[in-house]
């Protein structure tokens, strides 16, 4: 029994999906159910409500083998115009809340011995600098770094923690982004879907990933690679294309 606990492998397929109204939560629920998992999904806007719901469901179900936590994005803003109130709100939703949810899941999972894997889904802007999306990107980057430290603490308990940095999806692209042809400017020539990020989350829950922890997996169609064009002024990939012509 001890070797099973430390292996990070599943003995059951019971998943808790904690959705922060990102669209990834429902996609993960659908993907995991399609693969035969028993899924419980909860969602709420307030941190305290989410933690309370998670604890209640944990008690009702007798524990979970896996947990998926989604992290919301944030509106574009200017660093020079940023107000303290907005910074505090963003910090609470994009950093403190997911960390507290990881901590709660880890404590509950360590107590009952059933938890094997946690997957955190945040934004790909946490992997690269962005002039207009700096607030979400900075907080998501800090969150992923903190989660990597958590992974070191959870590994001896047989719990793995991995992060997914997800890019723009069909569900999150705004009309302005679509009009600007964002998808065509990505290496794959299209935006992805929440279901594709959910598929990666399911892969990270499998026993084949039982020795994988503390990694940031990017699912963004190449958006975060060096050279992604930020606008239509002709730098990034556009420059290389014109140079090669």
Image: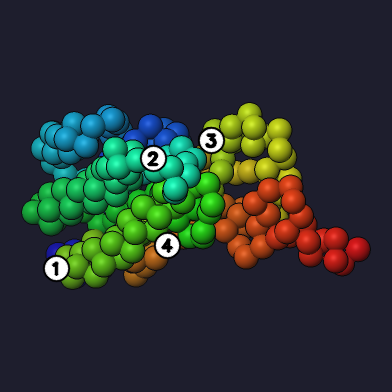
Q: Identify the disc placed on residue 216.
A: 4
- Please report contact status of discs 2 and 4: CB closer than 8 Å, yes or no: no
| Residue carrying label 3 | 172
Q: Position of residue 32 (x, y in %)?
A: 40, 41
Q: CA distance from mark 4 to mark 3?
A: 21 Å
**Crowding near the residue tagged with mark 1, few <14, some 14–19, many ≥20 C-alpha atoms within 10 Å:** few
| Residue carrying label 2 | 72
Instruction: Pick whichever, 196 or 179, lies toward us.
Output: 179
x 25%, y 57%: residue:
116
| Looking at the image, residue 172 lies above or below residue 210 | above
Q: CA distance from mark 2 to mark 4?
A: 17 Å
**Crowding near the residue tagged with mark 2, few <14, some 14–19, many ≥20 C-alpha atoms within 10 Å:** many
Q: CA distance from mark 1 to mark 2?
A: 36 Å
- Please report contact status of discs 1 and 4: CB closer than 8 Å, yes or no: no
Residue 52 seen: yes
Sequence-wise, the earlier of marks 3 and 1 is: 1
Tag nearer the camera, 4 or 3: 3
Furthest toward the right, the residue is 245
- Secondary structure found at label 4: strand
């Amino acid at each position: 029994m001890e070797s099973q606990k430390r292996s990070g492998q599943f003995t059951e397929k019971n998943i808790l999906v904690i959705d922060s109204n990102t669209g990834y939560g429902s996609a993960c629920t659908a993907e995991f159910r399609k693969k035969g998992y028993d899924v419980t999904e909860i969602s709420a806007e307030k941190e305290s409500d989410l933690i309370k719901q998670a604890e209640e469901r944990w008690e009702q179900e007798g524990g979970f083998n896996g947990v998926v936590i989604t992290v919301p994005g944030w509106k574009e803003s200017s660093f020079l115009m940023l107000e303290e109130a907005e910074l505090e709100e963003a910090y609470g939703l994009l950093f403190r809340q997911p960390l507290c949810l990881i901590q709660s899941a880890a404590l509950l999972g360590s107590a009952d011995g059933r938890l094997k894997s946690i997957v955190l889904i945040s934004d790909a802007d946490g992997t690269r600098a962005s002039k207009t999306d700096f607030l979400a990107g900075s907080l998501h980057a800090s969150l992923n770094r903190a989660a990597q430290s958590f992974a070191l603490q959870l590994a001896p308990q047989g719990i793995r923690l991995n992060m997914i940095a997800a890019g723009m999806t069909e569900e999150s692209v705004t009309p302005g982004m679509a009009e600007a042809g964002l998808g065509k400017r990505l290496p794959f020539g299209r935006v992805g879907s929440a279901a594709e990020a959910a598929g990666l989350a399911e892969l990270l829950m499998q026993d084949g990933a039982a020795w994988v922890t503390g990694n940031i997996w990017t699912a963004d169609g190449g958006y975060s690679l060096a050279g992604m064009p930020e606008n239509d002024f002709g730098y990034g990939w556009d420059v290389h294309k014109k140079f090669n012509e």
